[in-house]
Image: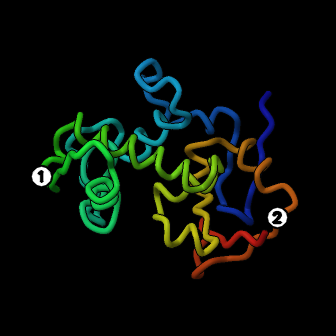
């Protein structure tokens, strides 16, 4: 029988080891060496190339065309590629930008996977201010990894939500 871990202060969701694996994609070979990418893609678009969010994120990896990964890619990538919002409907271009952005976040947060994953969802600004979307991070990374990261840190509610908290370090 599996043990259940209840985290009412973090997100009010019941997690089990099995629940941590939901969102797993059948793309593990394609994404070897990129931790959590398969879960991130599944959570963002369910693997659908034509996915479109209420906030305007487009495609397979849910790239924001303005003030997000596309702008960062067009500004900071070193290979000279420039893409438009229309290009985000192309799965290969969407993946290229999404992978580049995810890796950029990893470098920016110096390997802190919790901040990297949360920033993919919330952006640099919110994460830099100390906010972490725990609901999203739990779904991508799993409970044990996040609880290890949280060990000894204090959290308080952010903007009246139930799943995003400031982390006081």
What is the CA distance from the residue labelled 2 to the residue labelled 1? 42 Å
Tell me the element at label 2: loop
Q: Is residue 153 above or below residue 3?
A: below
Q: Which residue is at a point 68% across and 50% down the rendered structure image?
A: 14
Residues 77 and 68: in front is 77
Give whichever of discs 2 and 1 has the lower sequence position.
1
Q: Is residue 94 above or below residue 75?
A: above
> Looking at this rendering, what residue extends furthest in the top direction?
29
Q: Is residue 1 visible?
A: yes
The chosen color scheme is rainbow
> Looking at this rendering, what residue extends furthest in the right direction?
152
Q: Where residue 160 sits: x, y (%)?
A: 59, 81
Q: Give the crowd class for mark 2: few <14, some 14-19, many >=20 residues within 10 Å.
A: few
Q: Which residue is at a point 71% across and 49% down the rendered structure image?
A: 146
Q: Where residue 142 sits: x, y (%)?
A: 65, 41
Residues 27 and 104: in front is 104
Q: Where residue 66 sits: x, y (%)?
A: 26, 66
> Looking at this rendering, what residue extends furthest in the bottom direction?
159
* Numbered badge on residue 131: none
Q: Give the crowd class for mark 1: few <14, some 14-19, many >=20 residues within 10 Å.
A: few
Q: Which residue is denoted by mark 2 in the rendering?
A: 153
Q: Which residue is denoted by mark 1 in the rendering?
A: 86
Q: Quadrant of the C terminus?
A: bottom right
Q: Is residue 162 above or below residue 97?
A: below
Q: Which residue is at a point 47% across and 22% down the rendered structure image?
A: 28
Residues 92 and 71: in front is 71
Instruction: From the viewer's perspective, tell me whether residue 42 is left or right of residue 7.
Output: left
Instruction: From the viewer's perspective, tell me whether residue 98 is left or right of residue 104.
Output: left
Tell me the element at label 1: helix
Q: Is residue 53 visible?
A: no
Instruction: Specify the quadrant of the image occupied by residue 108.
Output: bottom right
Q: Which residue is at a point 28% across and 42% down the rendered structure image?
A: 79
């Amino acid at each position: 029988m599996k043990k259940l871990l209840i985290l009412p202060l973090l997100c009010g969701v019941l997690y089990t080891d099995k629940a941590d694996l939901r969102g797993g994609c059948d793309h593990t070979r394609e994404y070897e060496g990129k931790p959590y990418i398969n879960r991130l893609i599944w959570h963002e678009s369910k693997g659908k190339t034509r996915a479109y969010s209420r906030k305007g994120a487009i495609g397979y990896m849910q790239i924001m065309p303005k003030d997000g990964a596309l702008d960062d890619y067009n500004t900071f990538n070193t290979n000279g590629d420039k893409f438009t919002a229309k290009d985000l409907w192309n799965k290969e271009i969407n993946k290229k930008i999404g992978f580049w952005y995810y890796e950029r976040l990893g470098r920016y947060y110096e390997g802190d996977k919790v901040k990297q994953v949360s920033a993919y969802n919330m952006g640099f600004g919110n994460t830099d201010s100390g906010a972490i979307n725990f609901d999203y991070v739990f779904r991508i990374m799993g409970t044990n990894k996040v609880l290890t990261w949280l060990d000894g840190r204090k959290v308080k509610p952010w903007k009246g939500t139930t799943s995003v908290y400031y982390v006081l370090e």
